[in-house]
Image (cartoon, rainbow, N blue to C red):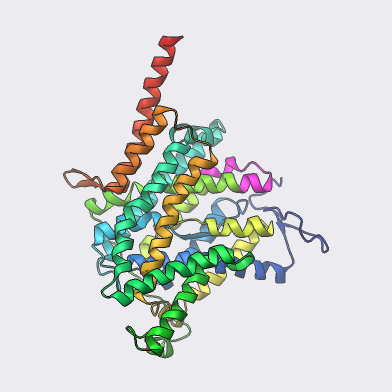
Amino acid sequence: MSNTYFPRWRRVPAGTEGVVVQPDERLSWPQNIAMGAQHVVAMFGSTILAPLIMGFDANVAILMSGVGTLIFFLFVGGRVPSYLGSSFAFIGGVIAVTGYAGTGPNMNIGVALGAIIVCGLAYTAIGLLVWWINIRTGGAAEWINRWMPPVVTGAIVAVIGLNLAPIAAKGAMGGSTFEALMALMTVFCVGGIAVYTRGTVQRLLILVGLLLACVIYALLANGLGLGKAIDFSAVASAAWLGLPHFSAPVFQVKAISVIVPVAIILVAENLGHIKAVSAMTGKNLDQYLGRAFVGDGVATMLSGAVGGTGVTTYAENIGVMTVTRIYSTLVFVLAALIAILLGFSPKFGALIQTIPGPVLGGMSIVVFGLIAVAGARIWVVNQVDFSDNRNLIVAAVTLVLGAGNFSLQFGAFKLDGIGTATFGAIILYALLRIGSRGRESQVL
């Protein structure tokens, strides 16, 4: 490995298609650009869906996803391939503190932005601690796994989807039978893409399903007059290039206390990303764990400062790397630059705003459900033993706290269901772990 901060990115020789391209290698520039564009398409569906569900400006979210990816690239020295997109972990907290109704711009966005910045600060502090531990002992990953084993992280991730389920159902039902049926049609579109397609189309199921549902909606509403027609006048009048609508943060203790616990979830997501890329490339990337956390945290703070969503490493882009076996970090620099260019296009933002509400409601059902199942998948992949009563109790209590939105209020400090479940899972596991150790020593 090079002793320089950034790799030297050795050019992969022509005629070696199909081989694994490591993070410190590169393809020809035309191939790099094509791969960067593919990563933009991969993250696109989820990165625009999250801000729309929260009432954020999609242009700002896309712009800051590109900026955040470049920040991450700088902190890890270009040695960890990753794209940072809008995090769904913030949705429950943002809706709770802003009272967002699900349509149009979020008028209380400032309160959420201030809390997102503080969450990013907490995440950065965790990253600095992990960075320091890695320098001193090299055992940061083991330390995190000890406090957040798969039974805990799986329960926390599942809770996000379960906590948001009522919001998804309400948005899908809409105000008429037609809107409810179109939401269900959206679910069928995504499900059909997921099951009956292969290759690139299947990997882009969120984006392709969204487009298909919009086409069907337009045929029924604009063509047959069965519902509210999609209005494209704003798209026609919007400029091709221009500044997005930035927003200023407002700092409130109650909002901060609700959203800051999301930092724990981001740690779990980023840890999983590093582990996955390490396994795929055959390189141990644990030494970059703290730097990755800091990069993600700083990117989240900067995004919140201008009106963007919190960001996280994206599983969609891991999927692209898995299929192509191209892990060159330069590809993500180009993807980030393409995203930044899209962020400065008001016409692109106006097009995003034409997505019908029932389609967004149906997409919310799918996405929130997938988040819940992703938590269960963590248990399955890591073979969590539920015959162990400690694991059983931790998972059971965490799920009910989150799904039931169990909240705690300490003066101005408030934990909503996701926050209570997050800290509850970590603390409960630690206490039961200590108790089980004591019992085991008595038996011996």
Front residue of 110/386: it is 386
Q: Which residues are magenta?
A: 277-291
Q: Residue at x 71, y 47 (%)?
A: 2
**Location of residue 361 by image quarter:** bottom left
Residue 386 visible at all? yes
Image quarter hosting the N terminus = top right
Q: Which percent across, then down, holds residue 239?
A: 44, 86
Residue 52 visible at all? no
Front residue of 392/9: it is 392
Question: Which residue is at the far right?
Answer: 15
Q: Residue at x 40, y 84 (%)?
A: 220
Q: Residue at x 37, y 85 (%)?
A: 221
Q: Which percent across, then down, holds residue 281?
A: 68, 48
Q: Which percent across, then down, holds residue 33?
A: 66, 70
Could you tell me what secondary structure mostly forms the magenta stretch? helix
Looking at the picture, does residue 32 appear above or below residue 143? below
**Location of residue 284 by image quarter:** top right
Q: Is residue 278 magenta?
A: yes
Looking at the picture, does residue 172 appear above or below residue 368? below
Front residue of 434/118: it is 434
